[in-house]
Image (tube, rainbow, N blue to C red):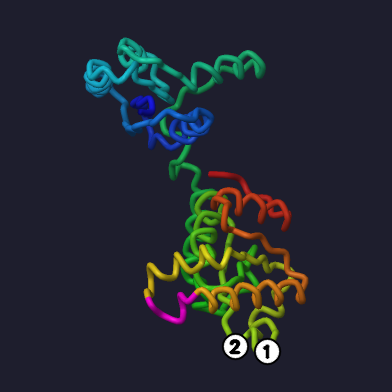
Amino acid sequence: MPQRRTVFFISDGTGITAQMLGHSLLTQFEGVEFHQVMLPFVNSQDQAEDCRARIEEEARRGNGQPIVFSTLVNGDVRAVVRRANALFVDFFETFIDPLEAALGVQSTHTIGRSHSALDKPGYAHRIEAINFAMAHDDGASHRELDQADVILVGVSRCGKTPTSLYLALQFGVKTANYPLIPEDFERMQLPAALVPCKARLYGLSIAPERLREIRRERRPNSRYADLENCRYEVEQAERLMRREAIRWINSTAKSIEEIATNILRELRIERPMY
């Protein structure tokens, strides 16, 4: 039986930062089953006491000492949670103190600075990018394609939509996506709407076997999900992308984060992460 540990991500904000940093550390440990609990918006000592009680209850279950990843800013709130019987990993304490010493400036210790709408220009830019991605999903609109930072192309269900939304949400990148269909393969030409935007095209491909699995969930027992049809579409899509000198990546074994990073790097798109 694998070792099992409960992990708490505690924050006075959304908890996204604590979860991202903590998850990156936990992925380095194989053979351990982590049960993850998010405790966001903890901004009072009473709420901290509730968190401490939950951690103590878990410690009494006998599944090993719980692990706590914290981005709590308020020292009094943090002190309450620290009293719990747990391994306490404090990201603010770990990183803020060395940064204050190096910069010669005291941090503001302001709650909720990350993942908030307080950065109005950045937040508005991100929302605009998300709306753009939704309006230009799956070739839904040809309007304003000249405003796209990148246009993803590939066969249906190869990962274009989730990648588009991730680029918009995390980086504020305006991303459209356009399916390559059998008619394009018969002509062996890009859709006319994409020709003026060729410099901003980026292709996604996928293993035919994996494509069949995904399509069968949507349309079982259809030609759309037939393995031979999947092989044909993938082969023709890759052939078309090579012919048009479009950069592309195989998405089969890559996460959305890896795909997005490759796109940003290869197209040299510089955007902040929100």
Visible residue check, residue 228: yes
84, above or below 266, in the image: above
Residues marked 1 and 2 touching at CB (< 8 Å): yes
Q: Which residue is mark 2?
A: 183
Image x and y of residue 75, in percent: 39, 15
Image quadrant for the N terminus? top left
**Marks 1/2: CA distance?**
6 Å
Q: Which residue is mark 1?
A: 187
Residue extent of the magenta highlight: 221-226
Q: Label 2, secondary structure: give it.
A: helix
Name the residue at 50% across, 53% down.
169
Looking at the rendered structure, the kind of residue marked 1 is: Arg
Visible residue check, residue 40: no
Task: Tell me: 39 left or right of 176.
Answer: left
Disc ID at residue 223: none
Name the residue at 76% across, 75% down.
244
Crowding near the residue tagged with mark 2, few <14, some 14–19, many ≥20 C-alpha atoms within 10 Å: few
